[in-house]
Amino acid sequence: MLFRARQPSWILTATIAGMPLWWALGTASFIWIIASVPMAWTLFRRTPIKAPPGFGLLLLFLGWVLVSASQAEGLRLISVGYRVALYFAAAILFLYIYNLSEEELPRARVLKLATLYFFYAIVGGYAAFIVGDLRFTSPMEYLLPGPVLENPLAQQLVRPTFAQSQDFLGPSLPRPTAPFVFTNEWGSGLGFLAPMVIAAWGVLGKRWQSCITLLALVAFVPIIISVNRGLWIAIIVGTIYGTILLATRGDTKYLRALLAAGLVCLVLTVASPLGGLIAARLANDHSNNSRLTIYEQTIDQIQDSPWIGFGAPRVNEDEPNKPAVGTHGQFWTVLYSHGIPGALLFVAFSLSIARRSLQGQDRAGVWLHVTVALVPVMMWFYDILNQPIFVIMLAAGTALRGVPRPSSSHDVDPVVGGASQLSPSQPTDTRTLVRTV
């Protein structure tokens, strides 16, 4: 069963399994922050808290985030405070996952929950095609005071929307959002979840393998119709990278599956209108020009506050109808919000965790590493706040726990031990975090 209230992992299970409900209530953008409270309490009760080497970089980044938050004023306090809360909640999730044992939170359950999360997003994709950009007032929106809802971000976070309609390819196209807030967040979330779903396909047994194969076929249509190039890049790069890693270690199962999947995708593309949609999206440079303008504005304006940034993205004063300055890429968001030191700390932490997450891994662990390793690739064009950062921390915490011992493993994974594993990371506790930077 996915849900066992007596296990400390019930918090994670309730958060992910209940995501459609949290989305409908208007709380999906806050649910991870809310869940971090009982997670922190769970950690507090089992001190000392273990943390992997390199976690000190994340603590330094969080400290710099607090310093840059001093730049907020007026209604911007809402967006700055919200982003600060997301970062700290993500750090808590990371430690929570890392400190739970295999008995308390089996790796197999993490993969099942990731697959369920992916399934919800695909259902949201099909819902977007049926109801378009339908939105409704959520219970959370009714509860918030009027002054808070004057902040555009706050209003978007609590008003569930099935799609964002855009017409840059001609006819208005409903690009999926549910159970996320923005269409790019939907693409980012799927991109980071995909390697974990691939891991589940390889190690959870024949029943799950059959269900995930069917899910992958069904997912192809909304992934293409979303015309989300970043998502396409994430899936292609992540799949090829993970397959090569395993093939060099003698595991060719995914190589054969990749070739078969590629052939199926080719047939579906050529034999349907999807091929024309892909070609039209690749030929259209609408978002390229918009992104380049935002990046140029980010670089120009950060020179006014290079050390601590501006706390959060700001409205584009030159073109108010355009996206905010300091968006459309986590690197640019961090650079603009927290200055050059904040950007360097974020990149250093991302690279450190990506490198460490590959050590001592088996087949499933390699795919968890792929999710983490995608951050340095996708941070240039994808924001990872809100929900995607928690997917990343879920994968990182699980990967850094190492390969489950055969006596307690809930996976079915033949690629363990011997030459298939590298030397594992050694954990530390919070009393030595300063020395692990």
Image (tube, rainbow, N blue to C red):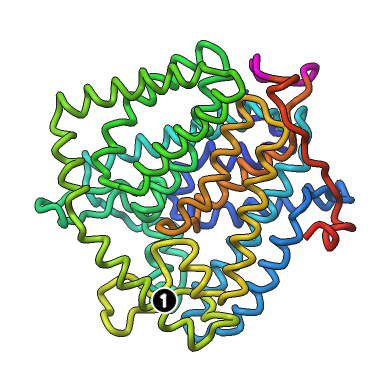
Q: Nearer the viewer, residue 176 or 370?
A: 370
Report crowding for label 1: few under 14, some 14 to 19, many 20 or more residues within 10 A (C-alpha): many
Q: Nearer the viewer, residue 123 or 362?
A: 362
Q: Which residues are magenta?
A: 406-415
Question: Does 263 lie within the magenta span?
Answer: no
Seen in the picture, residue 110 relative to 149 is either above or below; the reply is above
> SS at mark 1?
helix
Mark yes or no: residue 6 visible. no
Mark yes or no: residue 52 visible. yes
Instruction: List the single residue furthest toward the top.
Output: 206
Q: Is residue 19 left or right of residue 291?
A: right
Name which residue lies at 59% across and 36% down.
368
Name which residue lies at 58% across and 30% down.
111
Q: Is residue 255 left or right of residue 5?
A: left
Q: Quadrant of residue 308?
A: bottom right
Q: Is residue 107 left or right of residue 311?
A: right
| Residue where numbered disc 1 is placed | 298
Position of residue 350 measured from the top left corner of the image (x, y, whole percent): 61, 54
Name which residue lies at 34% across and 40% down.
124
Name which residue lies at 45% across and 46% down.
189
Position of residue 163 measured from the top left corner of the image (x, y, whole percent): 28, 50
Q: Nearer the viewer, residue 35 or 427?
A: 427
Which quarter of the figure is the C terminus placed in? bottom right
Three-letter amino acid code of the residue under disc 1: Thr
Q: Is residue 356 left or right of residue 191?
A: right
Seen in the picture, residue 321 relative to 32 is either above or below; the reply is below
Seen in the picture, residue 211 relative to 389 is either above or below; the reply is above
Instruction: List the single residue furthest toward the front.
Output: 248
Q: How many marks?
A: 1
